[in-house]
Structures are given as structure tokens and as C-alpha cells.
Image: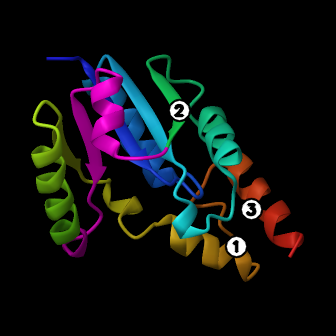
Amino acid sequence: MPAGAMYPGTFDPITNGHHELVRRAARIFDRVVVAVAASPHKAPVFSLDERMNLARKVLADLPNVTVDGYSGLTVEYAHAHQLGVVIRGLRAVSDFEYEFQLASMNRHLQTDVETIFMTPTEQYTFISSTLVREVAALGGDVTAFVHPLVAQALARQFSRR
């Protein structure tokens, strides 16, 4: 079984909740790939390159973590890069139904890739990229929810609008 895992997501932007989950996954797996999905249908605030660069800076202190961009099926990326595990975060019970369906479909599409669920520590259960973007867009302080570099990038991004 490959000792590598991927943590896929849009990461628009990467939050302290994402960071904490990656840090914990890096203790479990020899290699963790934070796979930033292009997700053009979601109309992300940051470009794929910007999201990848922010994630690389935030996660730079984790030697067994890399950041890569991708499009297409998550399990196809995992299979092609010999990553035997897809990590998904569950913040609340409301996340479970969708994530369960996704994991079941992924298992059907690629039987050699397993999905595991990780829950954030309590202080991060309410943080989502969507909420962080909304607060930042309205001029609110997001410094408690994201790395300082991400807070600066959000401030720059929303001052342009």
C-alpha cells in the first residue's frame, strides 16, 4: 500500500483549519500532497497559481508535504501519483452525507484508492473558505482564521474590487 495521501480541495483560500488537518496528516503519512483543484465552475477568487503559491508558503515548514494543482477526477490523480489515500475533512455532521456519497463514488471509480475522514480540532470546526471569503469581502478581520500571508492576499484581492 502506498505511504502517500492526497488532501484535495479548492483551497480558496487555505484556512487554518486546512493547515491544521495537513499538519496532522503529515504525522500519519510519509507523503502528503495538497492537491489544489482548478475548479473553474466554482469561480474561485484566487487563480489556481495563486492558491497553490499561498498553500506552499503556509505549509513550507512541513518537509513531507507538497502542493500540486490538478483538474479532473480526484481518484484518477491519486492513482496516477501512487497516492493510496484521499483525505477529506468533516467539520460537521452536515458534511457527512455529501462526503459519504463522494467516497462511495470514488471507491467505485478507483478501487485501489481509499478515502479517510479527519475532523478538525474544535476551534476550526466553523471555519470554511467560503465564510472567510465573505468576511474578507465585507472588510472583516480574518486574521484568526488564516495565515497572515493569506490575510494579506485577501485584503489585496478585495481592495481591487
Which amino acid type corresponds to the residue marked 3 in the rendered image?
Leu
Q: Is residue 57 left or right of residue 113?
A: right
Q: Residue furthest bottom?
A: 138
The residue drawn where x is 21% and y is 17% is 2
Q: Which residues are magenta?
A: 71-95
Question: Which x, y percent locates residue 59?
Answer: 56, 33
Give the amino acid type for the residue marked by disc 1 in the picture: Ala
Q: Residue 68: x, y in percent? A: 53, 32
Total numbered badges shown on the rendered structure? 3
Mark 2, residue position: 68
Q: Residues within 10 Å of mark 2 (few under 14, many from 20)?
A: some
Which of the numbered marks, if any, corresponds to residue 154? 3
Q: In which quarter of the view is residue 133 placed?
A: bottom right
4 relative to 94, above or below: above
Give the alpha-carbon distance from disc 1 to disc 3, as whole Å: 6 Å
Give the label on residue 136, or none. 1
Q: Are marks 1 and 3 in contact (CB under 8 Å)?
A: yes
Q: Quadrant of the C terminus?
A: bottom right
Disc number lying in front (2 or 3):
2
> Relative to 149, does residue 131 appear above or below in the rendering?
below
Secondary structure, mark 3, is helix
